[in-house]
Amino acid sequence: MNRFDSAVFLENIEWFDETGKELVHRLPQKGSGEIKWGAQLTVRESQAAVLFYKGKACDAFPAGRHTLKTANLPILTKILSIPWRGNSPLRAEVYLANLKYFTNLKWGTQSPVAFRDSELGLIRLRAHGVYNIQIVQPVLFINTLVGTMGKFTTEDIAGYLKRVIVSRFNDYLGETLDSILNLAGRFDELSAELQKRLVGDFSYFGLHLSHLYITSITPPEEVQKAIDDKSRLSVISDMDSFVRMKAAMAMEKASENQGEAGAGLGLGMGMMMPAMFAVSRESEPGSTLQDSAKGGSVCPDCQNRISVDARFCPFCGHQQLVFSKCSNCGKNLSPNAKFCSRCGKASGMKPERVFCSKCQAENVSGAMFCNQCGEKV
C-alpha cells in the first residue's frame, strides 16, 4: 500500500503482498512518480527495496525505515515543472522485492521423454516434481527479468523455469540411469544431482534454487503392465505348483455353486484335472512319470510317451492292456465286447486264449509271463 498525496505532503511508501505470489512490486505501480525529497520508505524483514531515480538504480535498502533523497522538493518542484505541464522530469520509483521462499512450484514433462532402457528397450517417461526459489540479488533480478513491469509474480516465470528443469533432467537421466527398474531408492540422489546442475541457470537471474524434488518418474501404462507381469513371475518360483493350486481352488469354488451349472462345471474341472497334473508331472525334472516314460512305450491313440506298466494313457485315457482289437478300425476292445466303441462295428475278432502251464490261469493274448504266478507261459 502506498500513498502519493498532494504536492505539499511527503510520501509514506510501503507494500504488502496479499496474494503470496508476487516476487517484485513497483511503487507507484502505474508509471513513475515524483517521489519527493524526504519521503519515508518502510521495508519489512522479508523484503528488499531498490530506488530507481532518473532511470537508474541508485540505491538498495534492507529492512527498516529509510528517508529517500531526490531533487523533487515540495512546492518548489511544482513551480519548476511548469514547462513540463506540472510533471517533474525527475522521475523516481521504488521496486520492492519479496525475499521469502516461494515453495511448491511444480515442474513436469509436458510430453513423454524418450529413454533407452537397458532391459525394456526404448520407452517414454513422464516425470514430475516440485521446487522452491528465493530472490538473492534483487537488482540483478529486476534488471534481467522484471524490467519496467508494475508487478512480477511466480506465474510469470514458472513456465520458463519448468522448461529449464525438464531440459536438464532429460540430459541427466540419459547419462546416469540405465534402467527404470533401478529407480527405487534413488529419487533423493537424482534430485540432489539435478539441483546442482540447475544452480547456474537460476543464479544467472539472481535466483537461488533452495530445494528441488522429483516426485514421480512413470513409464506408459503398457510398460507398467509389463513390469508388473515380470515381478509376478519372479515371485512365483514353482509355476507348475501354482497352476495346480489354482486349478484345485477353481474346483472347490465350482463345487460350492448351487444348481446344475455349478455341478456341471465342477464335473468338467474334475475330468480335466488328471490330464493337467499328468502334464505338470511330466514337465518336472526327476519326476517318476518322466523317468519311467524314458524306457516306456508310445500310446497308439495320441502318440504320447507313457510308462511301460501303464494300463491307461494319462493323456487321452486310451486302454493299453489289449484283450482284442476291432477288425475294422483297430480300436482296443474291452473283454467280451461285441461291438467297437469307436466305429460301432461288430468286433469280428475273438481274442486268443492263453493259459499258464503251471496254474492254468487265463492270460491276455501275446502274454509271455503269467499274470497270476509269474511263470513263463
Image (cartoon, helix red, strand yellow):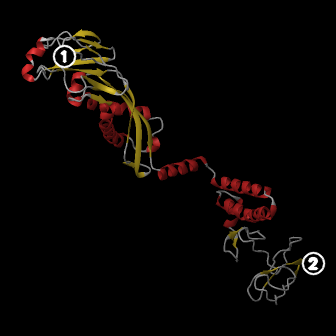
**Rendered position, 357 above or below 271:** below
Q: Amino acid at mark 1?
A: Ile
Q: Residue at x 86, y 70 (%)?
A: 374
- Answer with left or right where residue 59 lies relative to residue 273: left
Mark 2 highlights which residue? 360
Judging from the image, what secondary structure is the residue with disc 1 in? loop
- View extreme (left): residue: 83
- Answer with left or right where residue 30 lies relative to residue 262: left
Q: Residue 248 at what x, y percent from top left?
A: 73, 55
Taking depth in this image into account, of 289 and 215 the one nearest to the observer is 215
Q: Quadrant of the C terminus?
A: bottom right
- Cβ–Cβ under 8 Å for marks 1 and 2: no
Q: Residue at x 77, y 71 (%)?
A: 312
**Rendered position, 314 above or below 243:** below
Mark 1 highlights which residue? 35
Q: Residue 276 at what x, y percent from top left?
A: 70, 62
Query: Which mark is nearer the camera, 1 or 2?
Result: 1
- Answer with left or right where residue 72 lies relative to residue 214: left
Q: Quadrant of the N terminus?
A: top left
Q: Residue 18 at what x, y percent from top left?
A: 37, 23
Taking depth in this image into account, of 321 and 142 the one nearest to the observer is 142
**Rendered position, 359 above or below 284:** below
Q: Where, by quadrant of the figure, is residue 22 drawn?
A: top left
